[in-house]
Amino acid sequence: MVDMSSGESGTGAARRQALPGWLTSRLEGRRPAAGARRVLAAIATQPRQMSYASTSAAAGAAEVNVATVVRTAQQLGFSGWPALRSEIRSRYLSGLSASEVLSEHNEDAGQGPAWSTLRRDLHNLQDLARLLDEEQIERVAGLINRAGTTLVLGSGSFGAPGLQLSHLAQTIGHDVRLHRIGGTALFNAVSLLRRGDCLVVFQLWRTPHELLHAMQVAAEAGVSVVLVSDQVREDLTELADELVAMPSEGASMFPSLVAATTVVQSVVAALVAGDPAAAADWSDGVERLWSRYGLFPDSEDRLQ
């Protein structure tokens, strides 16, 4: 944490604010203009409010105009306020326990759990629409396509999008493997990756150190690293060839995987689009294999 003097007067009288380290590092030693300092001070002192504020609400909280909020977000390396707000929200929630997250959402509860969940995920998809980069998704698909082997990691329920990625990619002919075991088994699996292979990590909310250490091992070995994350952490950005940012806030105690699942669907669609004929041929072969061994019941079959 470092101090920052606002240099303002009146209602924004001169004061010293402590900026979170992630904001300081994004400034890269630059001293922001007075308006930007007001926005940064609002983020530092009102993280909860700023984490869900609209652009105009953020401007009001910082006592600046909307254009200043947008410029500040861009100076920090984000496309605009929605992208910065998503980062603030993810970092704010990652500092809470599951029960604290539940309390956070109970304060805003106005509907039943089903409708609250649906509304939250619609918001997540709206935010993802502003974050998703078509060219980046194509680059990620290219890394998987060129890799001899792709290893996919995710902790607990956060491995669910990885299961979808591995299964669908295998169905169209790519060697993509989900690894669910930690400890020595994890590092053994990562050690088998070679230069040109790919490691995909799903990092949401709180992620065990060993998954992040696995990224480090892979990067040092020349493995392409893809990180799908709800936070743009500088230390991980340095390790990842591609960092796909997406929101993950849930309506209750736990993060939502809807946006992460959409990212996976997008990558799989890009894999298919890269060579539709090859994807179709491989999928047809897999279907024949399933049929040969009667994996699925016929439509006329009935339970005995």
Image (cartoon, helix red, strand yellow):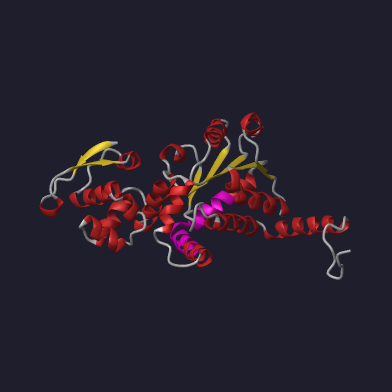
Say if the magenta span includes residue 130: yes
Q: Residue 20, relative to residue 116: is it above or below? A: above
Q: Given the current orientation, which residue lies at the most extreme left position?
A: 10
Question: Between residues 98 and 10, which one lies in front from this camera angle?
Answer: 98
What stretch of residues is rendered in magenta?
121-141
Horizontal placement of 212 versus 36: left or right? right
> At 61% from the left edge and 38% from the top edge, which residue is drawn?
196
Q: Position of residue 75 (x, y in %)?
A: 30, 49
Q: Given the current orientation, which residue lies at the most extreme bottom position?
A: 300
Question: Between residues 174 and 208, which one lies in front from this camera angle?
Answer: 208
Question: Between residues 78 and 154, which one lies in front from this camera angle?
Answer: 154
Q: Position of residue 254 (x, y in %)?
A: 51, 51
Q: Position of residue 211 (x, y in %)?
A: 55, 37
Q: Position of residue 229 (x, y in %)?
A: 49, 47
Horizontal placement of 176 versus 46: left or right? right
Horizontal placement of 94 versus 33: left or right? right
Q: Residue 44, relative to residue 193: is it above or below? A: below
Question: Between residues 154 and 138, which one lies in front from this camera angle?
Answer: 154
Q: Residue 89, relative to residue 57: is it above or below? A: above
Position of the C terminus, as image quadrant, is bottom right
Horizontal placement of 115 versus 197: left or right? left
Position of the N terminus, as image quadrant, is top left
> At 43% from the left edge and 45% from the top edge, which residue is drawn?
96
Which SS type dominates the magenta stretch? helix
Say if the magenta span includes residue 3: no
